[in-house]
Amino acid sequence: MNRHRWWRRRRFERDLSAYADGELHGAAAGRVAEALALDTGARRQLARLRAVDGWVQTALRPSAPGPDADAAADSIVAALVRPEAPSSPPARLRWRPVAVASVGLLLTAGIAVVGYRRRTRW
Amino acid sequence: MTDPGPHLRLHAEDHERARRLAREDRAFREFVAEFHPLAYDLALRTLDDRQDAEEVVQDAFVRIHGALGEFRGDASLKTWVLRIVWRLSLNRRRDRARSAWRRLGLHRGGDEADAPTPDRSPESELLSRETRRQVRDLIEQLSPPLREALILNSFEDLGYEDMARILDIPVGTVSSRIHTARKRLSERLRAAGLSLDPTEAP
């Protein structure tokens, strides 16, 4: 029986949390509204939930205005329509010599390691 | 432009709007100006750093412009934008967590919490800033799923359905996480000596 009461209480607390956000509907919302009308303890629980939310807003709410939205929009659109520099080569071509050099280095290192291990084994 | 078919296109107006935004710079500029405040607010609440938030939001809108062709209208444009901002904010958080500067706590001083508030005495400003920082730290101590649910729930114009789409989880899970987050935070607030009396709490 205790376990049943525990589940009912837990379910009520979850419903109360959703009710506080206006996200509980139908019969469940009706049950919570009735409990709040009749039970001081339920009203205190709701008040505590709202107090927690108040602290969350205190911590997270920006204390100063953000950047001007119009200026930000202009800046973002300008970044999108910026013309490409005609003289700079395509990015992938610059990486080709680096890639070739890296593969060469790896091969050389691999051959050196294999050679060393053969010498030490025999 | 991908057409998901009428049975999936729940936000037909937004779908049409996305097609127009991909073609017209002026329309896209208005779109950015419309959603920038909300996007910035979300990034700032997630990152607690004004510079990071500005950079993430800029990056987000550039990516959004490139992805307009993929918008299918199965969520609203607002939810779609916030989902992208959210993902980029979380990526930035993860990258920041690896920074030694951050691990040593040397980043404090450029944070949102240090922005001065007018019409306050220096003493009350300091107390307010300390309290904000304290509560912010308590929220940071929650596990990521609970913290994220709490941050999203702090927006009045985001319902559980929106949050479910942003987080890509069922609505029931959103509800459960918010409930658990409030409960855990409530315990920590009490342990920190911060009042949950509605006449004293902020």
Image (tube, grey):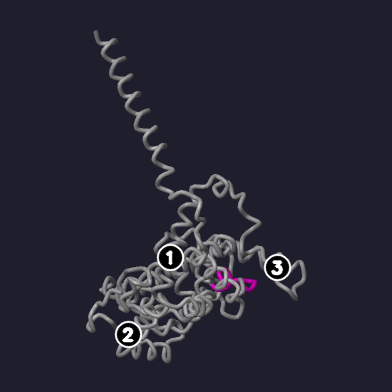
User: Which corner quadrant of the image does residue A10 belong to?
Assistant: bottom left
Which residue in the structure is indicated by mark 1? B63
Q: Magenta segment: does it hold A63?
A: yes
In this view, the mark in front (3 or 1): 1
Mark 3 and mark 1: Cα distance apart in space? 33 Å
Identify the residue under disc 2: B12
First reached walking from the N terminus: tag 3 or tag 1: 1
Task: Specify few, some or many for label 3: CA neighbours under 10 Å numbering under 14, 14-19, or 20 or more.
Answer: some
- Quadrant of the rendering where the N terminus of chain B is positioned: bottom left
Residues indicated by labels 3 and 1 sit on the same polypeptide chain = yes
In the rendered image, residue A7, in percent from the top left (x then y), is placed at 29, 73
Residue type, mark 2 in image: Ala
State the predominant SS element of the stretch in magenta. Answer: loop
Picture residue at 61% right of the left edge, 64% below the top:
B112
- Left/right of residue B153 with respect to residue A9 in the rendered view: right
* Residue at 47% over, 52% down: B95
Outermost residue toward the top? A122
Q: Specify few, some or many for label 1: CA neighbours under 10 Å numbering under 14, 14-19, or 20 or more.
A: some
Q: CA distance from mark 2 to mark 1?
A: 22 Å
- Which type of secondary structure does the marked residue at label 1 adopt? helix
Quadrant holding the C terminus of chain B: bottom right
In the picture shown, does residue A33 fall above or below B156? below
Contact, mark 3 vs mark 1 (Cβ under 8 Å): no
What is the magenta range?
A: A57-66
Camera-side mark, 3 or 2: 2
Amino acid type, residue under disc 3 in the picture: Pro
Q: Nearer the viewer, residue B39 or A35?
A: B39
